[in-house]
Image (cartoon, grey):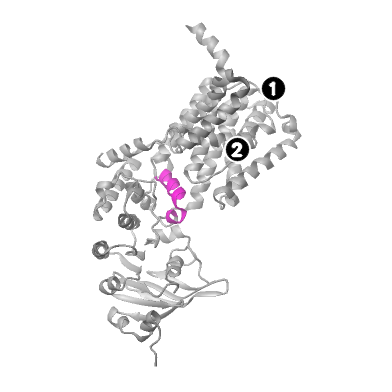
Amino acid sequence: MFEIKNLSKNFGGLEILKDVSLTVQKGSISALIGPNGAGKTTVFNCITGLVKPNLGSIQLEGQELIGLASHQVTRLGVARTFQNIRIFKEMTLLENVLVGMHSHLNYGSKDWLLARSSYKEQEKQARETAYELLSLFGLHHQHAQTANSLSYGEQRQLEFARALATKPQLLLLDEPVAGMNAAEKSRLMKEVELIRQRGVTIFLIEHDMRFVMELCDQITVLNFGQVIAQGEPEVIKNHPGVIEAYLGAVEA
Amino acid sequence: MLEWLETFWSTYNTLILSIGINSLLALSIALTLSCGLLSLANAAFMGIGAYAAATLTMQFNCPFELALILSILTPVCVALLIGLPTLRLSGVYLAMATLGFGEVLRVVIMNIDFIGGPMGLNGIPNLTSFWHVLAALLLVVYLLWRLKASKVGRAFVAIREDEVAAKLMGIPVMQFKLLAFSLGAGIAGLAGGLNAHFTYTIGPNSYAFENAVEILTMAVFGGANSLLGPILGGTLLTLLPEVLRGLKEYRLAVNGLVLILVVLYLPNGLWSGKSRRIKKSMTSVQG
C-alpha cells in the first residue's frame, strides 16, 4: 500500500499543497485529478524526491520516502513518466531501456573493465529483457533507432518501457494520454491495464475524464492544493464539490 | 632503412610525441563532455600532473613510472575536492568556474618558489619515450572503450541528455559526475606528466586559458562522441600548424578558417561514430 499523509508544500508564500492525504491500494489503478494548477505534479515531484515537502509523510509499504534522493526512491520501487516526455533522445531505444535497468545491473568496475563473465552475462540478459519490454509496446523493430526518430505517441510508450525497466512496484504516470488521438488513447488504456496485470500499482494524473473513469478504481480530486474528494469513479462523477471545481458554482 | 628511421625520429620526435599527448588531452575532455560537463579545467589538471611528475623526478629522484602514476593521482584528488562544489553548476556556469580554477592555479604556481615560481621548472630530464606515450594512449583508449560499453558509460550519456530523467532511473547523478570529472582529470594529468618529460621546461603559463580552449577544440573538431574522434582531432590540430608552415604569416588565419569550416559543416566533428554505433547495437541483441 502507498500512503501520503498530511503533505504540505509552500513555494515562497504560496501554499501549493495543503494537508494532502491519500492512499493507493496495492495492485490498483488510481488517479489524481483536478483543475490546472491544483498541485498534482507537485505531489508527484514530492514522491520522487525532486521537491522536498515542508510537512507530511509518504510511505511505500511502510518505507518512508521523504528525505531520500530521487535515485534512492527509484531503487525502492517507484518509477514515473513525465508530462513533457523526457526520454534520452540521442540514445537508441534499446539503450533508453537499458539505462532504466541501471540499478539492477550489479557488476563492479573490475567486471566491465576486464569484460569478465558476470559483466557479459548480465549485459546480455539486460539486452534481452530490454528487447522484451520494447516488444510489449510494439517498439522492438525500432530498437536500434535513436529515440528522436519516434512519433510523439511512440516516445510516450518508450518512456513507459523505460519506467518498467526499473522494476517498479508503483508507477506514476503524469498525463499519459495528453496530446494523443483516440486510437492511441485506447491502445494506451490497454497497455496500462497490461502493466497492472504485471503486478504494478498505477497512480496517474490525467485530464481526460473518459480515460480516468473507465480505467481507474479510485480517484482523488485536488483543488487549490487540497483534497476535495476521494472515492470510486461513480462517487466522484456526482460529487458536488468536484463539479463545482471543474465547472464553477451552480447559480442559486 | 634503420638510418632513415633514426633521422626521421630525431627530426620529428617532438611532433609525434605531441600528437600522442594532445590525443590524450582530447580524450580526457571528451570523457567529461560525455557526461554533459562542459569543464575547462583539463589544462589545469594537465599542469598539476606535469608539476607533480617533474617535481618528483627532479627533486626526489623518483623513478619515472612512479612519477607518472602520481601525475594521475594528484589531479584526481584535486578534482574530487573542487568537483563537489563546482559540479552543482551546469553549462556555461561550470565552464566559467573551471576556467576560474585554472586561473587561480596559475597564480598559485606563480607564487610557489619551490616549484620555480614564474620561471617554472627547467632542465626536466628527458625520460618520455615513444613507448610510454603509446602505452598511455592504448591504456586510456581501452579504459574508455570498456567504460562506454558498460552501465557507467550509459549513465554518463543519460546524465548528459536529461539529468532529472537519469536520477529517476536510479542513477546517483552527483557520484557519476564526480567520477567523469576525476577520471578526465587523471587522464589530463598523465598527459601532463608525459609532456613535461620531453619539453625540458614547464611554466605556470603553459596550462592557462589558451590551452584549455585548445583542448576543447581538438575534441570537438575530431568528434567528441567517439573514441576515434578526439584522437583524430588531436592529431590533425597538432599537424595542421606544421603543414601550413609554408603559408608563413597567414598560417594562424588559415588554421582558424579550417576550424570554422569544420564546426559549420560537421557539427558533430570529423568522426561522429554514429553509423557504427547503430550497427553495433543491432547485432548485439541477436548475439
Q: Which residue is mark 2?
A: B45
State which quarter of the image contains the C terminus of chain B. Answer: top left
- What kind of element bears circle 1? loop
Mark 2 Cα within 10 Å, few/some/many (few <14, many 20+)?
A: many
Q: In this picture, which residue range is highlighted in magenta?
A: B151-166
The spot of residue A245 in percent (x, y) is 40, 81
| Amino acid of disc 2 | Phe
The spot of residue A220 in percent (x, y) is 36, 77
Q: Which residue is mark 1?
A: B123
The spot of residue B256 in percent (x, y) is 56, 31
Q: Nearer the viewer, residue A160 or B150?
A: A160
- In the visual, does A185 lie left or right of B213? left
| Alpha carbon separation for disc pair 2 and 1 | 22 Å
The spot of residue B89 in percent (x, y) is 57, 52
Magenta stretch encompasses residue B175: no
Q: Is residue A129 above or below residue A180?
A: above
Rendered residue at 25%/49% (across/down): A140
